[in-house]
Every structure is written in structure tokens, then in C-alpha cells.
Amino acid sequence: MQSHEEPVLRVSKLSKQYGNGCGACGKEDAKSLEKNYCKNCGTVYACRDISFNLYEGEILGIVGESGSGKSTLMRCLYYDEDVTSGEAFLKFYKNGEANLFIESPQQKRFIRNSKMGKVYQNPVMGLKMDFSSIGNIAEKLISAGSRNVAFMEARSRGLLEHVNIPSYRIKEKPCNFSGGMQQRVQIAKALSNNPPILLLDEVTTGLDLSVQASVLDLIKSIQRELSISIILVSHDLAVIRMLADRTIVMMDGRIIEQGMTDQILEDPQHPYTQQLVHSLL
């Protein structure tokens, strides 16, 4: 991606901590910190000064081990959690001049429902399992202001067909579906309001390999077709290699390396990234 393009999303110095911190752990080189945990007061620094840009039509991969902060970052971007500090600016919202993290609750709902879609690792987080699949999508459309029943039904049917849910099953509840089908319904729901940004958090974890492949193919074809910008979190470098244009590597709540995916996989600079890449070979 060319750096002279205007980013769709700019994130600057995003931090998220659990706990108030103390005199011992507040400093950059604090001796009381074990990885990102303070042994003195119990504070966890889940994300520390995270800054990155996302460009139009780009898939940005975020990789790191469990506890590296990548899923916390996604929760903060989608307002599932409040940030401790930091800024984010969206090109399609208030001319890219409003910090998304300090907007009013109503505006945050609007951004969440109209400007972003999210697919969770656990479908229970993203779907109402006792609603029909079509009802799940209608709910997202209603939350963004749709009131036309015929439009909502047509849009929901079209999206579910697009993600290969058979038409005779669209009124079934997702709790009756396999894991792969539940992820497909989540993807359809996330796309319902044509958001410019899609957040995908470990969407293939726990799926069989053949199902993983079909979900990844679906994501790739949707991204090509809609030219949507995607942030893709995974601990699986094979998934990142297949989909991501650029990649960010996280460890202990920090970004330790970022660059073009090919460059990071072929010539990793940080010892942790080297270890990750060698474990894939």
C-alpha cells in the first residue's frame, strides 16, 4: 500500500490497561513489570501506545501469541471496551477530524452500526442464537435506522445467499448450524450496512481445516468484490500469509514489528517474529 494515500482509519497511541497502575509500573522501563503485568499492583497493560494506519481496500493482519493484546485492540476499535487513552480517526466520519474514542454514546452506536462490522472468534458474541439467521441481519439493519421490512428481508436473503447459506435454512436459528456456517452468518450480518471497515477476530480458530479454507476464500472474494478495508487478527501465520497485504506483529501489548506481509515473513527482524516464522516453516 502506498503511504501517500489517505488512510481510511488512523489509530494513534491507543492504550488499554486493566487496573490503576502504581508508582512502580508507570514508567517505561519499570522493573515491576513481568511482560505486561505489574507484580506489584496487578495492573495489566493490554495495549501500549498502539499506532497504525489502515488504507482503502487493504487487508491488515495483526499477529501475536495469546495475551499479546490483539483481541483487546479489536474490542477497543469496535467499542466493546473503552480505551484508557489514545485517538482514532475515520476518513468517512466527520471528515476524519473527530477522535472516535471521545464521541458521545449515540455517535459511537452510529459508528459501530454503520461504519464498521465485526466478526467475533466466538459466534455467540456476534449472533443472537435464538433469533433466525435472517432476523440477526435485520436486527443490524434496524440498529442502523432501516424500517422498510421488504428491503430488510431482501437484503438479508441476498447476504445469506452470498455467504452460501442455503435459502431453505435462512429462517433457522444459528444454534442449529455448524461452526463454519455460524461464521458465515456473522460475516453476512457484519456486511449488512456496507461498512467501509470489517474487523475479523480469529474467525477461523476452532474450525476444521476444510471449513477454514472455505471461510478464508469467502473473505478474500468479499474483499475483492467490495474493496472493503479489513483488519484481520490471527495467531496463525498461514492465515496472515494467505490474506494480509501488510502485517503488524504484537507482543506484550506493543507493536514490535510491522511491514509488508511478504517482507515480514521472508526477512523478520525481531527475534519473536523470527521465532513465529520459523514455527510456520
Image (cartoon, rainbow, N blue to C red):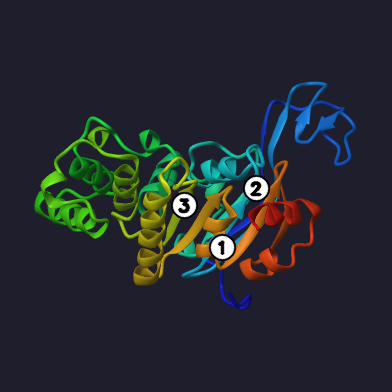
The earlier-in-sequence mark between 1 and 2 is: 2
Q: Is residue 67 left or right of residue 92?
A: right
Label 1 – label 3 distance at C-alpha: 17 Å
Pick whichever, 237 or 108, lies toward us: 237
Left/right placement of residue 35 relative to residue 205 reads right
Query: Please, what is the three-letter code of the amino acid marked with disc 3?
Result: Leu
Name the amino acid type tagged 1. Answer: Arg
Residue 250 in the image: state x and y as whole percent: 68, 49
Q: Is residue 71 visible?
A: yes
Q: Looking at the rendering, which quadrant does residue 45 occupy?
A: top right
> Residue 135, how many percent across, how many down?
19, 41
**Dot 1 and dot 3 residues touching (CB under 8 Å):** no
x, y (%) of residue 253?
Answer: 70, 42
Label 3, on which residue? Answer: 199
Q: Earlier in the sequence, mark 1 or mark 3?
A: 3
Which residue is depicted at the point 56% across and 37% down? 82
Left or right, 104 with respect to 255, comes to left
Front disc: 3 or 2:
2
Amino acid carrying label 2: it is Gly
Q: CA distance from mark 1 to mark 2?
A: 14 Å
Residue extending farthest to the top is 41
Mark identifier at residue 64: 2
Residue denoted by label 1: 241
Which quarter of the image is occupied by the C terminus?
bottom right
Residue farthest to the front, as pictured: 281
